[in-house]
Structures are given as structure tokens and as C-alpha cells.
Image (tube, rainbow, N blue to C red):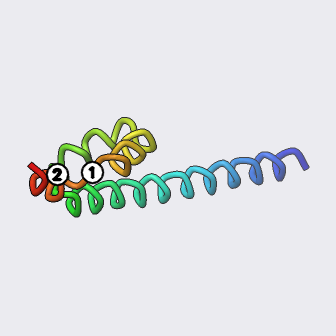
Amino acid sequence: MSALMLLASNGGSFLWSLISFALWIVIMVWIYNIAKRKGRHAIGWLILGFFFSIITLIVLLLLPSKTTTNELT
């Protein structure tokens, strides 16, 4: 019985890891697309997002678009 519970707990851990990895990939794609749309350096933001994914996403969402910023000056 304990072997079955151990297998179930490992399966749950694997599933959680798989879901977390998929969510991380989605956030990376989202960061890349937002940076590109806002006229920012997409690869640079992607590298930053590799280390600080959620913080990078929030900062990038708060930054204005470079195209609108350049038009104002």
C-alpha cells in the first residue's frame, strides 16, 4: 500500500512540475510578444524574463510603448 501511495505522490509531483513548466513557457512567449509589440528589445526582455518571469511581465506591462513615447517628443 505504501508503494502505491509513493507512486501517486510522485505522479502528482511530476504533473505539478509539468504544469509549472508549461505555464513558464506561456509567460515567456507572452513577454516576447508584448516586448515586440511595444517596440522594446524582445530578446533582452526574454532573457530578463528567464530569471524573473512574473516581475518582468509586470514591469513590461506597465511600460509605455516606445512608438508612442517617441511620437510625443
Which numbered tag is attached to residue 16? none
| Residue at left offset 26%, top offset 48% | 46
Which numbered tag is attached to residue 69? 2
| Residue at left offset 33%, top offset 43% | 49
Residue extending furthest toward the front: 72
Mark 2 or mark 1, which has the lower sequence index? 1
Q: Is residue 8 left or right of residue 2?
A: left
Q: Amino acid at mark 1?
A: Pro
Please tell me in which quadrant of the rendered image residue 30 appears: bottom left
Q: Nearer the viewer, residue 15 or 45?
A: 45
State the SS at label 1: loop
Q: Amino acid at mark 2?
A: Thr
How dense is the environment of label 1, judged by Cα within 10 Å: few (below 14), some, or many (20 and up)? few
Q: Is residue 25 left or right of residue 46?
A: right
| Residue at left offset 29%, top offset 59% | 34
Q: Nearer the viewer, residue 50 or 60?
A: 60
Q: Position of residue 43 (x, y in %)?
A: 18, 49
| Callouts 2 and 1 close, C-beta under 8 Å | yes
